[in-house]
Image (tube, rainbow, N blue to C red):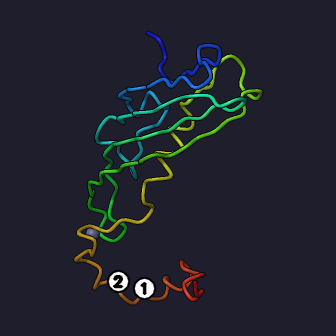
């Protein structure tokens, strides 16, 4: 089967746009199943690829669902994640034969996954650890005092 995530430069003509529509499984992206993060749905990819002069430009849209344990009570929480209109650019001269979108998609997925989730956006168990959390807060947000 042809790998949709390989973008062959010589097939792209100036100003001609190509579409990539694909449904990827976590394992297609070499994402291991982890206790802390479960990909609940396949990753829907919709991308537009084109070149402008000496640059390859990729416009990426992603949609997928994950389950992440609540940081407080450990209950698994379902989150739907969307990436809209993200641009990746790469100089053509840096690309050998084809550009492999796989690692970029993988990185994008992980970047979008919140590192801190709480069930119901306010875990019922939070009361129990309130004091602990207060102390943590200062360290976690070193820039919270900065004015815009
Ligand atoms: Zn919770």
Farthest residue in the top direction?
1
- Mark 2 lies within 8 Å of ligand 1 (Cβ measured): no
Q: Residue at x 45, y 61 (%)?
A: 115
Q: Residue at x 59, y 40 (%)?
A: 88
Q: Residue at x 30, y 51 (%)?
A: 80
Counting labels gives 2
**Which residue is disc 2 drawn over?**
129
Image coordinates for residue 148, horizontal then vertical, percent: 58, 83
Instruction: Identify the image quadrant of residue 91.
Output: top right
Image coordinates for residue 56, horizontal then vertical, percent: 64, 31
Instruction: Identify the image quadrant of residue 58.
Output: top right
Left or right of residue 143: residue 97: right
**Which residue is disc 1 drawn over?**
132
In the picture shown, does residue 119 fall above or below 131? above
Farthest residue in the right direction?
93
Q: Residues within 10 Å of mark 1 (few under 14, many from 20)?
A: few
Alpha carbons under labels 1 and 2: distance apart: 5 Å
């Amino acid at each position: 089967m042809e790998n949709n995530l390989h973008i062959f430069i010589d097939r792209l003509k100036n100003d001609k746009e190509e579409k990539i529509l694909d449904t990827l499984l976590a394992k297609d992206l070499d994402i291991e199943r982890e206790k802390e993060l479960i990909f609940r749905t396949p990753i829907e990819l919709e991308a537009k690829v084109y070149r402008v002069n000496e640059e390859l430009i990729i416009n990426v849209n992603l949609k997928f669902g994950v389950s992440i344990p609540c940081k407080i009570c450990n209950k698994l929480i379902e989150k739907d994640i969307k990436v809209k209109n993200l641009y990746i650019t790469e100089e053509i001269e840096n690309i050998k034969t084809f550009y492999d979108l796989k690692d970029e998609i993988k990185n994008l997925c992980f970047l979008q996954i919140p590192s801190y989730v709480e069930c119901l956006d306010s875990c019922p168990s939070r009361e129990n650890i309130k004091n602990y959390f207060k102390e943590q807060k200062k360290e976690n947000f070193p820039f919270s005092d900065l004015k815009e």
